[in-house]
Image: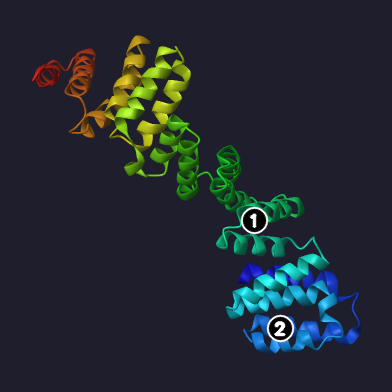
Amino acid sequence: KKIDLQNAGHYTVTRIYGLPEDDGTKLRKAYCHILIGEYDNSITQITRTSNPKKEPLCMYLLAVAYEHKGDHSKAYQFYNLALQLDNDIADAHKKRAIYEQELKQWDRSVQDLTEVLRLTPDAYVIYKIRGTSYFYLDRFTNAISDYSKYLEHDSTNKEVISYRGVAYKSNKERLKAYVDFAQSDTRHMLDFNDMNHLIDSVLNKGDTIQVMDVLNKITENCPYFTEGFVSKFRIHLEREEWDLIQKDIARAIRNSRMDAPKSDHAYLLTLQAMHYVRQKHQDDALKAFDEAIR
């Protein structure tokens, strides 16, 4: 509501000085009534102006008053009328778009939200809202693009990351979807067998850069991906990157899943033993080797 009042106040200032003095006084009063929650008094003041149906400020303030009053059908009606008189009211486009989403008029909401971005290019939150409309239109590439643009400004928003993950999955980009699901703490969306299969497919193409990027992101946020740690450590071992193995090996073993392949758990223990050998901790190495064999 505070944002609504700021937007309404800004538009009132831009329009009111070109109006007849008596109308200007009534509309100032109408805005003040909205500020203190006297919506019926605000509506009365607006309807007493000389020609409210021809003035976009009147229609816009009526829309805000009815919306805050809880009469959303009338609010939607007056946002429409306001935009017919002035198509450059960004807030009215945004509000109408949200009503259109409620009505499942996804195409119309996309058009209105695009207008908001035309008028206020820095309003990055609109990308999140428009991404939802694109998703329900099955325009998944557009939805992914909008969610990504939003995340450029708010990279820690796990809700939007999970939305993008669903869009990736719907767009048959499953590996990217799993990265987002891991980063958004939606573990129930992770299919460890499928993730491992997809990573093996990329490895077979020789793209270790992509694989390492994916594995680092997933294992950082989801330490239960035992198979992912194994794939990552195999690459590190081939490159003799023992410092990177040392960094994660204890966490990988501590979080190893009960349903992960036994061979993977044994491999992690073997790596830990090899690390102990390198550190000349022979007793610890023997215990880890014994546990791996067991």
> Could you say which is closer to the camera, residue 289 or residue 165?
165
Q: Is residue 10 visible?
A: no
Q: Position of residue 73 (x, y in %)?
A: 62, 74
Question: Relative to 44, is 7 above or below?
Answer: above
183 displayed left or right of 14 = left
254 displayed left or right of 83 = left
The disc, 1 or 2, on the residue closer to the chain's N-terminal end is 2
Circle 1 sits on which residue?
109
Question: Relative to 71, is 215 above or below?
Answer: above
> Could you say which is closer to the camera, residue 50 or residue 263?
50
Q: Position of residue 253 (x, y in %)?
A: 22, 29
126 displayed left or right of 249 = right
Q: Position of residue 153 (x, y in %)?
A: 59, 46
Q: Which residue is found at the position 44% from the left and 36% from the top?
A: 177
Real-space Cα distance between discs 1 and 2?
Answer: 30 Å
Q: Which residue is found at the position 48% from the left and 31% from the top?
A: 173
Q: Quadrant of the N terminus?
A: bottom right
Question: Relative to 191, is 5 above or below?
Answer: below
Circle 2 sits on which residue?
32
Q: Is residue 104 visible?
A: yes
Q: Which residue is found at the position 44% from the left and 38% from the top?
A: 180
Q: Which residue is found at the position 77% from the left and 65% from the top?
A: 83
Q: Position of residue 5 (x, y in %)?
A: 67, 72
